[in-house]
């Protein structure tokens, strides 16, 4: 089990394979390790009972200064997008000189922020970081993950640290999606296990030295890991794209053609080749979906998973065992997995997938219901998709949804034909067999289009939401006062009716925005629109910790728990994070796409 929880901020491949070869990994960390051990030993068993302010004084600040080498100022004002002044707990400076320079420019907020290496927000020990809680120890009763994203955007700082003393998270303002992307370390677990190697995954990423630029390269350690991870993902995308176009897709299509020949189809027409192409595309999309979902921990990876199947295929291939052109064992394994995803399987913790991609009776899945591919064709394609010709498995978590979408979108401009040997090949209208990339819209253009088209519409709704909250908040305060007086039942009931209406209007104002792409292709525009909308809503909702949208999120959480329970699956409600549920609501209520 890794010593970190990397939520796609970096590449797991980089963290596990390349980082141990860097000079920073070989540094002597014994002094910092001993200091942290002493701090923890002195406070062990007490930190759980401390208030937020007490924990900062007794634990967070000593770790920041004595272990990580930070210089800091507390509660520095930061003006948000709405003009409100926010105060992150800490402005962190990588050197004493940068702190003094910032202090000299305190009157100029932008100039001050230019010297800040990171901002930090601290909560009481063990406080959930992904939802609001009603607890006297929580001063603001806000969602911490909403807070840190709002502070990052307002401050314009590249990096943010969020901690509850036990868990330490690193967020980046440069991440393509800031809403649910971070790197985390469980510091309590490291201390309890006495794991100095795991401690390196904390120290190297959270210490002040990681934020100081190297004199030779001009890069900080974090920049180099972030960009190195991005380079790996781009190289992986290019390699995977080439393999899919030149080998994987033709292998899968060849399997279907061979099966058809075994079953009496002597020749293929243009229409049948189109059906084979559509079926192969559908199968490939299923495989990419599962590889990505399992890599991100969204689906089980046990006995009944693509993780297990790809492991079996790899072992078979590595042994050099012959693969039968008649046997379809691996196809049967895949078909069983597809059924479990479609129907759900409580024995493996697999919920029903609510979509048409895996649904057996969906019209677009007819080809896959009626065809199969033998091991000799399917196994090589699966292995290339899983390992790309390398000994180890591909880090699919490093690939974004947009990158996978670009592969899918590229395939749409191709068609299937049979070469002189009767084997399937992909070819576009120009007779080219390689992906050109001409179909792909660069991400910066998508960002611009979303900001320019969705931005003004959302700004109007944000203003309307704030106006409604200005009505709601005093009425809530009045209701609390009235409820304390049992003789004012009629007034209390009237206020509740008014608040129910205002709450519904406020939530509908935000979630009533509609974004449609009439030619969605891979969904690149809509994926970014979803992330962009979710982030903007997070920032807005952070202004009002007690708001009707969060109440709806709580209702969605209860509904999901109940639906899964009806399927025989038990889930901890705390694992259903506000951020993910808000994104889910945006996707279900605000995002529409057409692809004819």
Image (cartoon, grey):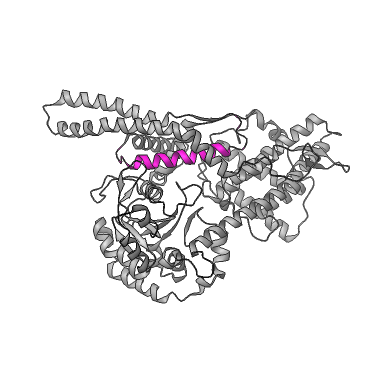
Looking at the rendered image, the quarter that the C terminus falls into is: top right
The residue drawn where x is 38% and y is 59% is: 116
Q: Is residue 211 above or below residue 177?
A: below
Q: Nearer the viewer, residue 215 or 569?
A: 215
For the image, the number of numbered tags is 0
Q: Nearer the viewer, residue 268 or 203?
A: 203
Whether residue 474 sits left or right of residue 433 in the image: it is left
Q: Main secondary structure of the magenta part?
A: helix
The residue drawn where x is 56% and y is 40% is: 446
Tell me which segment is drawn in magenta.
Answer: 518-546
Q: Toward which corner of the image does residue 39 lie, by quadrant?
A: bottom left
Report x, y in % for residue 392. Answer: 64, 60
The residue drawn where x is 57% and y is 70% is: 21
Whether residue 568 sits left or right of residue 402 in the image: it is left
Residue 537 among those drawn in magenta: yes
- Residue 406 visible from this viewpoint: yes
Q: Toward which corner of the image does residue 119 lie, by quadrant?
A: bottom left
Report x, y in % for residue 134. Answer: 27, 44
Whether residue 152 sits left or right of residue 230 in the image: it is left
Q: Is residue 187 above or below residue 145?
A: below
Report x, y in % for residue 498. Answer: 25, 24
Q: Nearer the viewer, residue 292 or 368?
A: 292
Residue 235 among those drawn in magenta: no
- The outermost residue toward the right is 420
Q: Toward which corner of the image does residue 12 lie, by quadrant?
A: bottom right
Report x, y in % for residue 349. Answer: 50, 44
- Residue 570 visible from this viewpoint: no
Q: Nearer the viewer, residue 263 or 173?
A: 173
């Amino acid at each position: 089990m890794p010593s970190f929880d990397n939520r796609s901020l970096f590449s797991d491949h980089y963290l596990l394979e390349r980082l141990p070869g860097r000079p920073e990994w070989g540094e002597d960390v014994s002094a910092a390790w001993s200091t942290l051990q002493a701090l923890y030993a002195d406070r062990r068993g007490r930190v759980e009972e401390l208030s937020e302010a007490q924990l900062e004084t007794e634990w967070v600040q000593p770790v920041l200064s004595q272990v990580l080498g930070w210089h800091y100022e507390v509660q520095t004002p930061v003006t948000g997008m709405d003009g409100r002044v926010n105060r992150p707990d800490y402005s962190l400076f990588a050197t004493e000189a940068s702190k003094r320079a910032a202090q000299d420019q305190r009157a100029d907020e932008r100039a001050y922020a230019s010297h800040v290496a990171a901002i930090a927000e601290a909560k009481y020990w063990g406080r959930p970081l992904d939802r609001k809680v009603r607890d006297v120890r929580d001063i603001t009763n806000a969602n911490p993950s909403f807070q840190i994203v709002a502070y990052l955007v307002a401050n314009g700082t590249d990096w943010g640290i969020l901690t509850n003393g036990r868990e330490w998270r690193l967020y980046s303002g440069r991440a393509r999606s800031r809403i649910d992307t971070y790197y985390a370390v469980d510091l309590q677990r490291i201390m309890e296990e006495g794991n100095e190697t795991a401690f390196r995954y904390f120290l190297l990423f959270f210490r002040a030295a990681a934020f100081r630029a190297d004199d030779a390269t001009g890069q900080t350690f974090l920049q180099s890991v972030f960009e190195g991870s991005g380079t790996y993902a781009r190289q992986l995308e290019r390699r995977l794209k080439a393999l899919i176009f030149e080998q994987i897709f033709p292998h899968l299509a060849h399997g279907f053609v061979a099966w058809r020949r075994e079953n009496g189809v002597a020749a293929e027409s243009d229409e049948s080749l189109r059906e084979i192409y559509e079926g192969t595309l559908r199968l490939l999309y299923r495989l990419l979906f599962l590889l990505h979902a399992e890599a991100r921990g969204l689906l089980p990876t046990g006995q009944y998973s693509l993780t297990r199947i790809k492991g079996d295929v790899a072992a078979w291939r590595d042994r050099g065992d012959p693969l039968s052109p008649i046997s379809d064992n691996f196809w049967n394994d895949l078909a069983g997995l597809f059924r479990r995803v479609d129907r759900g399987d409580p024995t493996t913790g697999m919920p029903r997938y609510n979509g048409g991609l895996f649904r057996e009776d969906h019209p677009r899945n007819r080809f896959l219901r009626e065809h199969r591919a033998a091991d000799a064709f399917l196994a090589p394609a699966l292995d290339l998709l899983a390992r790309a010709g390398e000994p180890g498995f591909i880090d699919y978590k490093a690939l974004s949804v947009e990158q996978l979408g670009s592969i899918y979108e590229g395939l749409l401009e191709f068609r299937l034909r049979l070469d002189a040997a009767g084997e399937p090949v992909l070819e576009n209208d120009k007779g080219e067999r390689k992906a050109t990339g001409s179909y792909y819209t660069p991400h910066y253009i998508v960002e611009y289009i979303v900001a320019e088209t969705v931005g003004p519409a959302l700004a109007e709704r944000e203003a309307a939401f704030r106006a409604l909250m200005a009505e709601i908040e005093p009425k809530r305060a009045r209701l609390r006062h009235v409820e304390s007086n049992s003789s004012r039942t009629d007034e209390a009931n009237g206020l509740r009716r008014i608040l129910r209406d205002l709450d519904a209007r406020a939530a509908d104002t935000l979630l009533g925005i509609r974004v449609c792409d009439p030619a969605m292709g891979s969904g690149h525009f809509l994926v970014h629109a979803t992330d962009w909308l979710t982030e903007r809503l997070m920032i807005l909702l952070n202004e009002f910790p007690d708001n009707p949208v969060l109440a709806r999120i709580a209702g969605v959480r209860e509904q999901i728990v109940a639906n899964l329970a009806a399927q025989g699956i038990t889930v901890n409600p705390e694992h259903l994070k506000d951020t993910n549920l808000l994104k889910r609501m945006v996707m279900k209520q605000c995002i529409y796409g057409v692809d004819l």
